[in-house]
Amino acid sequence: MLNRASKPFVKLVERYLPDPFIFVLILTLVTLAAAVIVEQQSPVTVIEQWGSGIWGLLTFSMQMLLVLVTGFMLANTPLMKALLSRLAMLGNTPGKAIVLVTIVSLTASWINWGFGLVVGALFAKALARNTRVDYRLLVASAYSGFVVWHGGLAGSVPLTIATEGHFAQAQIGVISTSDTIFSAFNLSLLAILFVVIPLVNRLMLPTEHDSVFVDTDKLSETQAPVTTNQRPADKLETSRALSLLVGAMGLFYLVSYFIQEGGLNLNIVNMLFLFLAIVLHGTPRSLLHSLQQAVQGGSGIIIQFPFYAGIMAVMVQSGLAQSMSQWLISMASADSLPVWSFISAGIVNIFVPSGGGQWAVQAPVVLPAAMELGADVSRVAMAVAWGDAWTNLIQPFWALPVLAIAGLKAKDIMGFCLLQLAITGVIIALVLRFL
């Protein structure tokens, strides 16, 4: 049934969804027009807001590019390729491959969202080399696991409100992760999604006739050119001692960091990937060859993230994000506020695809509403977190690293993700409302 249900979504998206760059250009125009019409801002003011914010994600853009590059380099080491290939042998049928890549992606995303994006995509490629399976659904399954990240160990909202000195502390105090990430309703929701998402992906598996397969030759990595070590520079480029020394220093720092109870964040994940790659590649030349392959897929991140930064600036500075949230929440009661917060967060996430940034926009709206209505503040906060994660299923912003690694376009996977969006949205809303 789900196989048949997914066909119209897949065909619709393949036909009408443009390249993510076109999507962000259209989204930019829609946002600017809405700020002028809804918030009655002058066009000049809105354009100034957009232009002043366009470079607001430079640090994050570099972090995301490094997620792609360092993750690729690590997975391209001989040891990691062997491990992925061995694990991929367990997915020796199309159905098993779909379920396996989904579970791996869900687990990795729960640990850390950057880790989940890279590992899921790279494991999908490893599975595709061994098993003849619809490559579009395989990659979509790898991306679908990303939906749980904000309910996991690296969730921006629950970690923010659990941190002493956060901006809303005067209103709600410090809320422990035992009331958010490790609460009964959040763990129950995760358990349900860990069952439902792999099952839905498996049931969407197309028939042999309708499947689209990938040429496995395109998935193979090119080998580093063999050169003689005739120059002193060649000896340095192939020096294992140099790589081991620098790599060991980086790993020593990371061990010290974790001993001092440092937590996972994007910088630490990138650093871990980088220094493990340096050590496991063995020589600087091998690492640099892998780097040359990795950067080819980073163009989407480089060109699109400035436009999303501009959109976020307009949404926040014009008051458009707050207005959207306030309108939805105005219809809520104490019991239904988490659901309306979830829906509003999902809509705002299309325009403000940043967990921390979205909480800064929506907290001033949802927290006073929760206090006034007597709603469960921790549940409302997690509702915003889940709403942010939910519509990532159809937000090309976060799919860019996955698509770059897999060598696909957004239209190839978004049809499957659209059906997952509908199913997971119902499940999350029901759990927030009744569990």
Image: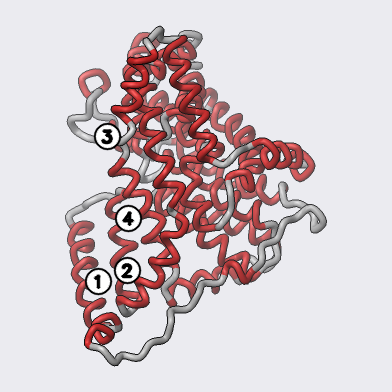
Mark 1 residue crowding within 10 angstroms, few (<14) / some (14–19) / many (20+): many
Evaluate if marks 2 and 1 touch, with contact meaning CB atoms under 8 Å apart.
Answer: yes
Amino acid at dot 4: Val
Task: Indicate the position of residue 428 as horizontal and vertical percent values.
Answer: 54, 31
Q: Quadrant of residue 394?
A: top right
Amino acid at dot 3: Ala
Task: Indicate the position of residue 50 as horizontal and vertical percent values.
Answer: 35, 25
Q: Report the front residue among 20 and 403.
A: 20
In the displayed structure, 187 sits above or below 216; it is: above
- Mark with earlier residue (3, 1): 3
| Residue under numbered circle 1 | 247
Evaluate if marks 3 and 2 touch, with contact meaning CB atoms under 8 Å apart.
Answer: no
From mark 3 to mark 2, how far is it between C-alphas? 31 Å
In this view, which residue lies farthest toward the right? 209
From mark 2 to mark 1, how far is it between C-alphas? 7 Å
| Residue under numbered circle 4 | 269
Q: Report the front residue among 289 and 71.
A: 289
In the displayed structure, 311 sits above or below 229; it is: above
Q: Can residue 231 be seen in the rendering of this structure?
A: yes
In the displayed structure, 108 sits above or below 333; it is: below
Q: Residue at x 40, y 66 (%)?
A: 292
